Amino acid sequence: MIDLSKIQKALHLDELEKIRVELLGKNGVITKEFKRMKEIPNEQKKEFAKNLNELKNKAMELIAQKKSQLEEQALEEQLQAEKIDVSLYSNRSEIGALHPVQMTMDKIIDFFVKLNFSVETGPLIEDDFHNFEALNLPKYHPARDMQDTFYMNDGMLLRTHTSPVQIRTMKKQKPPIRMISPGAVFRRDYDLTHTPMFHQVEGLVVEDKDKVSFANLKFMLESFLVEMFGDVKVRFRPSFFPFTEPSAEADISCIFCKGEGCRVCSHTGWLEVLGCGIVDPNVFKAVGYENVSGYAFGLGVERFAMLMYGINDLRSMYEGDLRLMEQFK
Ligand code: DAH
């Protein structure tokens, strides 16, 4: 007798397939029975064929049934195995890190706060008076071209530097003043070392007349630059800013080649890092100060960060690429 009961007992699809071949394959037991037909006496042939066809149909039906049952079971097993419990806790909590610009800014602020400077802020959207006019940059003054400005329709503008916070602080307070002002500034610029938004730190010291000299400014900035960049030489070069007179730019000896000359310092051995000077009398006049003296300075935070962390494309700092950012953990 041909036993169909093992179809029911198949546990897996491949086992069922094996059983199907055993029964109905080219050499299967049922197939073989059909080949036996010619040995059957004529009068029994009809009965034999009928029974055999019934058996074959029964086997096919049982296999199909079992197959769909096993397929359903396999799907169910797969779903169970791949199930994700979204309510489970993950113990892999990533610890974030500060952005290199923020770290640099914090370091700068720390230095000046220890020297008793206050930290002042001002609006990002400025008017012409605070951003230019009061800083001795009258309309049509050619030095306005030093800063490619974003203007709004109503005549307001995105501040091009943090210097306007000098003006706001002097109008709000009375001397003596020792302040820095960190924050975002905006200019129409975009290349390896410029982004349309970047950060500056402005500094201002105002004291009684004749109390503040260029020597004070020089000593303070030298200490600051050594604190930031380590063992560097500092030099001051005469320069021009409308809001200071005399004005200077401060350079540090190149931190990459130690002053020997390399690509980063354009083979000069020096890196320009900030602008500074003695506050121009016209600036004091604009805020109604008399009989005072002061110095000021301004620096780009991204430039400091690029030098401190060896980043060569400023734009990469604002692409949010975690592969870069994770290096600062
Ligand atoms: N405001 C200048 C700039 O954005 C930087 C600067 C230079 C600020 C000299 C100062 C200064 O206060 O004295 O390029």
Image (cartoon, helix red, strand yellow):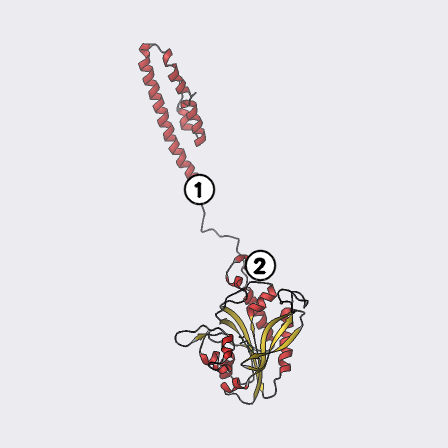
Please state if 154 lies on the left or on the right of 311 as rendered. Answer: left
Check the image and report above or below for 207 versus 30.
below
Q: Position of residue 44 (x, y in %)?
A: 32, 12
Q: Which quarter of the picture shows residue 157?
A: bottom left
Please state if 300 lies on the left or on the right of 47 as rendered. Answer: right
Q: At 41% across and 19% down in the image, what residue appears? A: 29
Q: Is residue 329 visible?
A: no
Check the image and report above or below for 194 versus 239.
above
- The CA span between labels 1 and 2 is 39 Å
Q: Residues within 10 Å of mark 2 (few under 14, many from 20)?
A: few
- Label ID, residue 60: none
Check the image and report above or below for 33 versus 124.
above
Mark 2 close to ligand 1, CB under 8 Å: no
For badge 2, the amino acid type reads Gln
Tag 1's secondary structure?
helix
Q: At 41% across and 18% down in the image, what residue appears? A: 32
**Quarter of the displayed picture in which ligand 1 can be seen:** bottom right
Tag 2's secondary structure?
helix
Decide which of tag 1 and tag 2 comes sooner along the chain. Answer: 1
Per the image, the residue denoted by label 2 is: 327
Assess whether mark 2 and mark 1 are in contact (beta carbons under 8 angstroms). no
Per the image, the residue denoted by label 1 is: 80
Q: Quadrant of the C terminus?
A: bottom right
Please state if 265 lies on the left or on the right of 119 as rendered. Answer: right
Mark 1 close to ligand 1, CB under 8 Å: no
In this view, the residue in front, 64 or 27, is: 27
Q: Which quarter of the picture shows residue 251?
A: bottom right
Q: Is residue 62 visible?
A: yes
